Image (tube, helix red, strand yellow):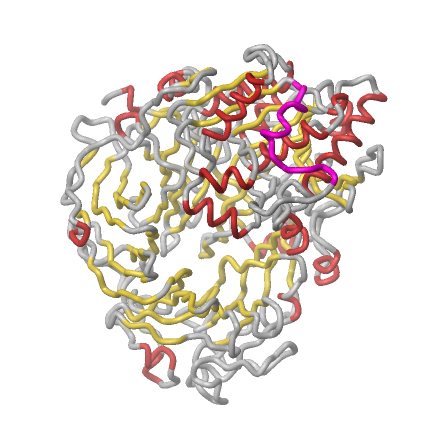
Amino acid sequence: MNVATRRSTLALRRLGFTFASDGSHAACLASGADGGWYAESWRLPADGPALPTALPLPGSRSESLHSQLVSLADGTVLVCRHDSDRHEVVLLSAGDDGAGPQVLQSPAFESPVLGAQALGARSFGPEPGPSLGGTSLAGASLAGASFDPALPGATAAPPAREWRLAALRMPGLRLLPFPAAPAPAPTRASLLLPSPSAAPVAPTPTRAADAPVAVALGTDARPVTTVWLVRTDGSAPEQVAELPGLHGGGVWLDRAGRLLGLDRVHEGVVRSVVLDLGLGEVTPLLEIGERSNDRLVLFDPDSRFIMVRSDAPGADRLGWGVLGGAVPLRFPDCLHVPGVFLRPVALRPAPPGPAGAPDAGRTDAQLPDGGRPGAGGGSGLPEDVRVAVQIDHGASSALALWQPAGHRLEPLPVPPGRLGAVAHWSAGGLRMPYSSPDQPAALATLDVDALLGAGPAATAGAVPLPLQLAPLSGSLPQPWRETAPPPSWGGEPRVSRTSPPGWRLDGSVRPADGSRWHSAQSLELAGPAGPLEAVVYGGDAWLSSPQLVLALHGGPADAWLLEFDPALQRMAAEGLAVVAPNQRGSTGYGTGHAMAVRGAWGGPDLEDVLGLLEAIAGQRSALGLEPPALFGVSYGAFLALLAAAHAPPEQVARCAVVAPFLSGARLLAEASAPVRALTTRLGGHEPVTDERGPRDVLQLAHRIGAPLLILHGDRDEVVPVGQSRSLRHELIRLGRVEGADFRYVEAAGAGHELLAEEGSAVLHELLAGFLRTGRAG
């Protein structure tokens, strides 16, 4: 065993959760205190806690945080790694302490169509690159300073065993897991047309060694979607279809792995189709309106229960029906809450029963067989089918149970925080990812019946705040409350942290010293055009903290969430209060809020930030405290620099920015094609014409007087490092002294997500120290 290849498994961040089709295992990407990413495999017993196993890569390599994982039923993990237009598929399994090679060169396949060579062993981590002036933080030094194996609670895992299966070249590639077990494959006709032969066949309990475990969907610029079957027996991926157009989604319509529902984009319209993997052909599945967008959301092959999302009723709504049954699609009012995104994440199938009668909200939309009365051989929707629905609004999530026969959403009293938008519901319970500001992401297991019996959670008392800054009584808007009165969904620290009966969280780690993470609350702050939600660290006395940071998120189509954030945790540990607002342009508050900055980067959102600075700085001045510091990442860094230039000097103590760009036009001129396309789509190149003048940081650099820290990775693939280099040169030209007036740090080998990449703990420390003291040297 090589001790150097072992990595901390004190997971502080987890993302990309995926469940094995049979629910026996899950997988995710995890990051420890050193910031290096690795895969985790979770065993999910029916009668016990979920148990994670780290799968760190051999040779001290880190997994890319953009890798896609597929959890398999034997606990191994399929990984798709993306490197520009090259996509490598590998299989990981848990290692051991024995000797022997960890990177296994089993027959690897590179797409012969493109004439590439077969894979060899190589490191996928970037090499340290040169810096352009300022301070260079090489990748090796970052990693070396970020993890102390002697820390209590920090454990090491042996390197995983790695089989390299294949590599494919095309602009995009993603994997879909196969169903849990094979069964005699039905034809599309037997699935969709009502007949006795359409009844599902019991699946066989085992899968052949050479059976496919995943489907790979590749897209190119023609546009064409190519479909392969992926196996783990060493054989090359088998191409089974080439489909004109772009195809997303992916819902299995049988347990044999032959019929796959996909969402096809054609002439600006998205509609679900059925791909027959045996024939390599697609046929329509959902065509509700003449030009409606109709997408398959959930399907149960046994009961044929189907959930769809469609704008055919006049707005984007959720509907349900029985595929091939007598009941037409219905769009219940309780599943339509304006301004709130309802996301069905899992269902618990029930035995077949007689088709139900139409209810309120029925439309004339019919299923593919025309919804003829009596169709489907009497197999309709059972009365006790239950669907778990995640409800997202603003920074937090809620969870509800929906039953077609109930005509309402039943709120489940889950703790405040953020749910993971993916779930699996089996006899062992409803399992889904969960995180809160003081609980790193982990897997929650929910006993839905016990939660329903627990009743609403206790409501937190209001936290008194000055300046009309009032806490949210709940982070969901009034329409949801009228639909079904929920428990307190806010994040106030006065809410009891005792888990409700029926809720268990497995794998969420505590700090290495055994203490607790810093909590945060969801507050509503007064903005110039209306209330703004913010995630706030610092307890009830946050406004009177000796130092306070106004943190601005990236995007602009993004938002701060009520979840664990290592960078904000480090600031809180430094004694800083943190206010992280979701100003106009943030997602999660309806179309109007999100679209407010379309074609107006640095317009309404800058006004919100300047309004918050003025209010908070004024109150702190009355208390004899210094003004807030500014912190921003990517788009938030651009916004922070604009705010530092436009705000009066007495309102900004200092400013720290990570991966900033200088203006939408300058980003458009230097960025890669995908970033240019996104910038154009969001109107970032359009000038804002008002009394504040151009939103160009380079033209405003002379007005930035606060101490400044600039961090940028020299391999940033989103915002080119040339943006920060130009700002550094302009500051020097203006006579600013590097090391005194400002500090420029270029992280060698780091990309755009440098606060989440390997070695990020060093940058968290640097940022927190600067934001507390303002010392640039």
Q: Residue at point 77% right, 41% down?
A: 527
The percent position of residue 209, horizontal first and vertical second, equals: 18, 54
Q: Is residue 693 magenta?
A: yes
Please state, as top left, top right, bottom left or bottom right, where the N terminus lies in the image: top left
Quadrant of the rendered structure where residue 227 is?
A: bottom left
Residue under the point 66% across and 20% down: 654
- The residue under the point 29% across, 57% down is 215
Q: Quadrant of the C terminus?
A: top right
Choose between 431 and 250: the one closer to the eye.
Answer: 250
Which residue range is magenta in the image? 691-706
Image spot of residue 514 (x, y percent): 54, 22
**Number of disc labels:** 0
Q: Is residue 250 left or right of residue 485?
A: left
- In the image, taking residue 64 as reference, residue 320 lies left or right, namely right
Q: Nearer the viewer, residue 493 or 61?
A: 61
In the image as oriented, which residue stretches furthest toward the bottom? 373
Q: Between 768 and 305, which is closer to the camera in this rendering?
A: 768
* 111 sits left or right of 438 in the view: left
Rendered location of residue 391, percent (x, y): 61, 55
Residue 397 visible in the picture: no
